[in-house]
Each structure stands twice: as C-alpha cells, then as structure tokens.
Amino acid sequence: MALRCRKHRLIASLETAALQHGLELVDLELTSYHGQRIVRVYLEATAVDGQRHPLDLDELAAANSWVDAILEVDPPYNGAYLLEVSSAGLDRPLRTLEHFRRFCGERVKLSSEAVDGRRNWTGELAGVLDGVADSAIGSTTGTTSSAVGQSEVEAGQPGALVLVKLDGLEEPARIPFAMIRKAHVQAKLQFNNGKGQ
C-alpha cells in the first residue's frame, strides 16, 4: 500500500515536471528484476499541431537529469535502484482515459481485475464510455467518446468503461476503467513481404 501511495505521489510530481519540459509522462513503472529494483519512466513529446514525435537521445538525457532530481527528493524505494528513462515505444502503455481515447481504433492488450470471470483482454480499442455505472457492469448512462477529449483524473473515474472489440465477437467488451491494472497498444509491425528492399 505504501508503494502505491508513493507511486501516485511520484506520478503527480513527474507529470508536472514533464509538462514544464514540453513532455508528457506516459507511465511510471516500479518493478524489480533478479532482485534489482527498477524505476522506469516513459515519456513522449507533447503534441505540436496535433503531431507527436519520439524523443531523441539528447531529450532523453536531459529528461534523465530532472527525473533523477525529483527521485532524489522523493525516492521510490529505500535503498538503491536502477533508473530507466525512455520514450513510450511501439508497445506504448495506456494509463489515463485520455490515453485510451487517443488510441481508439488501435489494437490493445490489457489486464484487469476479474470482469465476468476474465482478466486478460486483447482486441481493438473501440472507445470510452463516460458516465456513472449502476450496479450491473456495462449498464450505464453517458456518452461514448473516441476522440481526444477533456482531461480526466487517472484514478477512480467512477463509471467510465473502456470498450474493447474482441476477435470474433460482435459487441465490444465493457471493462470498468477503475478495474484495469495494465494496458498497452500492440505494435503494428509491417514487413515488405519479401519484395525488394
């Protein structure tokens, strides 16, 4: 529980600093690998004329400095850890409702608390349904949004549903946003089918 509170506090600090540097905090990951604690910070450039660009090495090096300064004041762990600052990448994480809106139409993979006995979901992101859910999952009043819209609070957006069109099913699954644990865009890799170049 303490780590979760610390993570939310760090996200707020990093989001503010990122905006001051013309960047967006995509995600913060606190994890470990073979006993080594790791802090991963995913960033991307804010939109200019609706376009975003991947960060280059100079931008990542500069970001590493201010991220490190924030973590020195409010460390994510007691003791040593490895800091990784990177661009969001092809398998871009989805953390906020705005992220889900922006990537509507893309193929996504997410995990959640159990919804109708299911925890893992892969399919096309069909939209976000805003509103207040009643007692039945998927029964809600509100509007569907598939375009970048108003800014939403990351945690505890009551009643918001993420719609995912699963392969082979007509109707999209309705997953409560508050129950999503991890989500990312699945990269589209295209090869030239063996034709020349």
Image: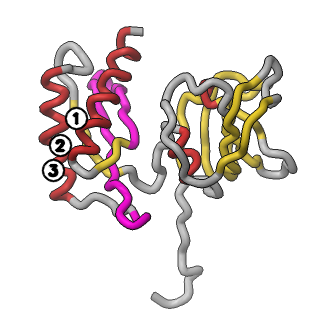
How far apart marks 1 and 3 lie (CA) works out to: 12 Å
Disc 2, SS: helix
How far apart marks 2 and 1 lie (CA) works out to: 8 Å
Disc 1, SS: strand
Q: Is residue 104 above or below residue 177?
A: below
Q: Is residue 52 left or right of residue 117?
A: left
Do tag 3 and tag 2 residues touch (Cβ < 8 Å)? yes
Please provide the residue range marked out in magenta: 26-51
Q: Residue furthest bottom?
A: 196
What is the crowding at mark 3: few (fewer than 14 residues within 10 Å), some, or many (at least 20)?
A: some
Relative depth, front residue between 159 and 4: 159
How far apart marks 3 and 2 lie (CA) works out to: 5 Å
Q: Where in the figure is residue 18, as x and y percent of width and height?
A: 26, 43
The residue that disc 2 covers is 64
Q: Where in the figure is residue 175, as x and y percent of width and height?
A: 70, 33
The residue that disc 1 covers is 83
Relative depth, front residue between 61 and 82: 61
The residue positioned 12% from the left and 32% from the top of the image is 69
Q: Where in the figure is residue 120, as x and y percent of width and height?
A: 67, 34
Do tag 1 and tag 3 residues touch (Cβ < 8 Å)? no
Can residue 33 be seen from the camera position used here? no
Give the number of marks.
3
